[in-house]
Image (tube, helix red, strand yellow):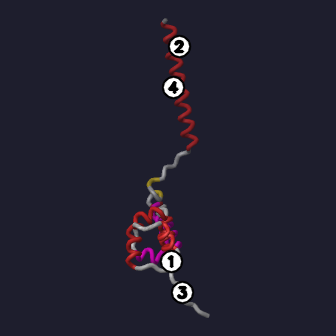
Amino acid sequence: MNTATKPKHIGRNISRIRELREMKQEALAIALGVSQQTVSNMENSETIEDEKLLEVAKVLGVTSEAIKNFSEESVFNFFNNFYDNSASNGQGAFGPVYNFNPIDKLVELYERLVQAEKDKIAYLEKLLKDK
């Protein structure tokens, strides 16, 4: 039985990193100065020249090693650890966590609007009485 590991598919890694960055093939193509079809072909290739990989890495904001060693598991582990570590100090993944009930806020807003209308009615009644 052959237990040799399958080489990483560099093009697929570029595609996934591009998608995680919410970048379209066309935007990557423009940044690289190539056609969208060239980017598509690159993403379907198992290997890419080192010079081209460095250019792509620069545009995607990662290192060429990050592209070569990219795996879905590592991304999910990173985000899970990031969230876990952030939450442990009283912060959420992207800042403080505010705990409030949106229904309470809605009721508070409604009560303020009703009070404003009552104040308006009282003012108009006073104006009518003064005439």
Write the residue at 49% across / 62% down: 24
Q: Which mark is residue 5?
A: 3
Dot 4 lies on which element? helix
Q: CA distance from mark 3 to mark 2?
A: 85 Å
Q: Is residue 50 left or right of residue 102?
A: left
Is residue 12 in view from this perspective?
A: no
Dot 2 lies on which element? helix
Q: Amino acid at mark 3?
A: Thr
Write the residue at 50% across / 12% down: 126
Q: CA distance from mark 2 to mark 1?
A: 79 Å
Spot the residue most to the right: 1
Q: Which comes before the other along the chain, label 4 or label 2? A: 4
Q: Which is closer to the viewer, label 1 or label 4?
A: 1
Q: Which comes before the other along the chain, label 2 or label 1? A: 1
Q: Quadrant of residue 53?
A: bottom left
Q: CA distance from mark 1 to mark 4?
A: 66 Å
Q: Amino acid at mark 1?
A: Ser
Q: Quadrant of the N terminus?
A: bottom right
Residue assigned mark 1:
45
Dot 3 lies on which element? loop
Q: Dot 4: few (<14), some (14–19), or many (≥20) neighbours within 10 Å?
A: few
Q: Are marks 3 and 4 in contact (CB under 8 Å)?
A: no
Assess whether residue 61 is covered by the magenta stretch.
Answer: no
Residue assigned mark 4:
116
Question: In this view of the protein, which residue sits in the foreground, 107 or 50?
Answer: 50
Q: Quadrant of residue 105?
A: top right
Q: Which is closer to the viewer, label 1 or label 3?
A: 1
Residue assigned mark 2:
125
Q: Please provide the residue range marked out in magenta.
A: 64-86
